[in-house]
Image: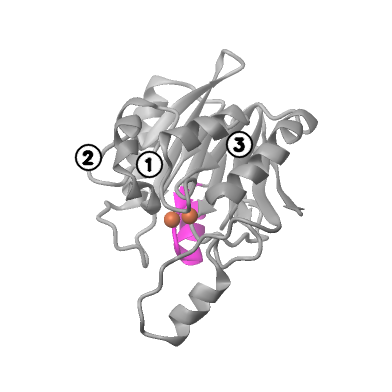
Amino acid sequence: MRILFIGDIVAKLGRKAVSEILPSLVEEEKVDLVIANVENLSHGKGATPQAIDEIRGYGVDIMTSGNHIWFREETYPLLENDPTIIRPANYPGDVAGFGFTIATVSGKEKVLVVNLLGRLWIPDPTEDPFRTIDEIIADQCAKEKFAAIIVDFHAEATSEKMAMGWYLDGRVTLVAGTHTHIPTSDTWILPKGTAYVSDVGMTGAQHSVLGVDPETIIKAHKYPYPQKFEWVETGPKIFSSVFVETDKKGMAKSIKRIDKILE
Ligand SMILES: [Fe+2]
Ligand SMILES: [Fe+2]
């Protein structure tokens, strides 16, 4: 199976980059399943139901998210009812939405997609992501045989992400880090067959700091005054993703970055 994972799609330029690249990329690489992180889909803050529909139209099958998905209350009912968009599984049980989902590829093969939130430097109320993933894998693998298991580990610290990669080596197909918006070059296959990347990186405005106008962020570092975040909506766009091919055992045969810059 051939799986494409797109990093945090940020605001209008991010959606535009997906629209310009994804349809032809799916064809060129014969992609079977497209997963994308959408926590910043709508003006950088959360994802409106309309924007979710929009990127689904470009070919995104499953959407993961993270700590920034909660900005828009109008999306909560969607999170409760639409299993193709998930939020981190280690939020407490009474938080809206699903923490994992099962995608069906080519009408038969099942792929388990899990979203987790890191705990280092992310103050959200969450349970231990390590014990959470253990429980999900045990429960779901007892019921179903998966052609692949994909984990979006939405976390700040590379140390926590790497630890998760090693923890899941041989048990899942891909551990893809998201949240920092900065792509890392450590696309590795760990010894027992799990593909790993510390951060997929963002898809959005290139001339920005994580999607935001650089001037605003520079001011925020220089002055104590509150700053209104302006999301960059013009100029060149970056598209950041990783592409993974699975073997018959559901482990990774290969992983590569697919990154593009569009004027
Ligand atoms: Fe993000
Ligand atoms: Fe995030």
Label 2: which residue?
93
Say whether disc 2 or disc 3 marks the residue closer to the N-terminus. 2
Amino acid identity at mark 3: Met
Q: Is residue 10 magenta?
A: no
Q: Nearer the viewer, mark 3 or mark 1?
A: 1
Q: Residue at x 39, y 57 (%)?
A: 118
- Residue 251 is tagged as 3
Name above or below for residue 176 compared with residue 53. Answer: below
Q: Nearer the viewer, mark 2 or mark 3?
A: 2
Instruction: Report whether 179 appears left or right of 139.
Output: right
- Which element is circle 2 on? loop
- Quote the CA–CA distance across marks 2 and 1: 12 Å
Q: Residue at x 38, y 24 (%)?
A: 142
Q: Is residue 150 visible?
A: yes
Image quarter where the C terminus lies is: bottom right
Expressed as whole percent of the image width and height from the top left, the position of residue 32 reads 65, 26
Amino acid identity at mark 2: Gly
Q: Is residue 193 visible?
A: no
- Quote the CA–CA distance across marks 2 and 3: 30 Å
Label 1: which residue?
87
Amino acid identity at mark 1: Arg
Looking at this view, name the residue that lies furthest to the top. Answer: 107
Name above or below for residue 143 compared with residue 84. Answer: above
Q: Which residues are magenta?
A: 153-168
Expressed as whole percent of the image width and height from the top left, the position of residue 87 reads 37, 41
Instruction: Report whether 112 appears left or right of 122.
Output: right
